[in-house]
Image (spheres, rainbow, N blue to C red):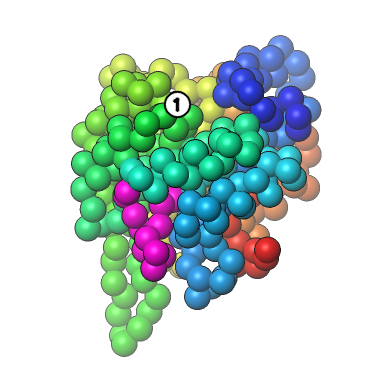
Amino acid sequence: MSDLHGEGALKKLYHFSAVQQKKERTVDKIIIKACLNGARGREQNPNVPWTPAEVAAEAKRCSDAGASMVHFHARTAQGATSYDPAWYTEADRLIRAQTSLVLNHTTARMQDATIEQVLRYLRDTPEPVDMVSLNTGNIVFNTPFAQGTRRTIAIPNSYDDIRQTILTCRERGIVPEPAVLDTGFLTNVVTLVQDGLLAPPRYILVEFAGRFGDGFQIMPGTPRSYFYMTECVKELFPEAFWIAHGLKTACSRLPVLPLPPVLTFGLALKIEQHSLMVH
């Protein structure tokens, strides 16, 4: 764990893949990425951190427990999604003052936000963040069934949105973490590589939904989905390794820990914010 924790962790993350290719396909290191406050609200868990100080305190706890990286989203005082560069500036400052974690911001936005709002907080922090989670496709889901219907929510992410995000990362020296939620997202990653916007990735975030019928129009969080997606990653990008995790309930439905080491080559663990999280 300590090999991937501390100063120079980003370089070690990329070096890890190259070293592992020369060994048998077994895991001898685990990367723990703690996601502190993504989609959950305090109605689901009163301990979800919203303020920069709260996020920094949770990041310190994760660092002390052995995490290498933290991913987080800006929130307003009421817990809504925020795109405020000042929020990210303060959170980054507080975390870096206490830890040597790799910091990872989101680039996801709600359907009523513009790509300019995302690019602004990527550009306007005094010190650039280390990494960003780069969603590589549109996220579409249906709300729970109520009054005889469901509402469809589409989180936009066009090719040009992704292109602008990558170029902004390039300007500031931020490492984009390609996030693939389905094979269509993986197709987009291949397209971005073909177009010269992305280098062939050495590190990919593989995400899943909870189950069939839960509303998310992405792959469900099952072992079959995991094997299929990671086999695609290995075929398309042989030198890449990946972090696998699930959105919402998928964390408890994707049993990655019991998988044989030979099958979990390149797997690192991402601890998603959970409804049972406590102080």
Q: Give, as a three-letter code, the residue at label 1.
A: Val
Q: As drawn, is 171 to the left or to the right of 214?
A: left
Q: Is residue 17 left or right of residue 109?
A: right
Q: Where's the N terminus, which quadrant?
A: top right
Q: Quadrant of residue 70?
A: top right
- Left or right side of 70 for 90: left
Q: What kind of secondary structure does the magenta stretch mostly adopt? A: loop
Q: Which residue is mark 1?
A: 175
Res. 196 image quadrant = top left
Q: Taking 133 as reference, is 262 left or right?
A: right
Residue reaching furthest top? 22
Residue shown at 71% from the left, 12% from the top: 22
Residue beneath the point at 26% across and 39% down: 120
| Count of marks, rendered view | 1
Q: Secondary structure at mark 1?
A: strand
Spot occupied by residue 251 in the image (x, y as percentages of width and height):
61, 56
In the image, residue 14 sits, relative to residue 117, either above or below, namely above
Q: Quadrant of residue 127?
A: top left
Within 10 Å of the Cα at label 1, are there few (<14), some (14-19), or many (20+) other Cα atoms?
A: some
Q: Is residue 197 above or below residue 110?
A: above
Residue 119 location in percent, x, y? 27, 37
Residue 74 is a magenta residue: yes
**Residue 147: where, in percent of width, then height?**
31, 87
166 above or below 135?
above
Looking at the picture, does residue 123 appear above or below residue 210? above
Q: Measuring from the top left, give residue 241's x and y in whole percent.
A: 59, 28
Q: Residue at x 29, y 42 (%)?
A: 118
- State which region is magenta: 73-84
| Towards the viewer: 64 or 163 | 64
Q: Residue at x 68, y 63 (%)?
A: 279
Residue placed most toward the observer, 26 or 47: 47
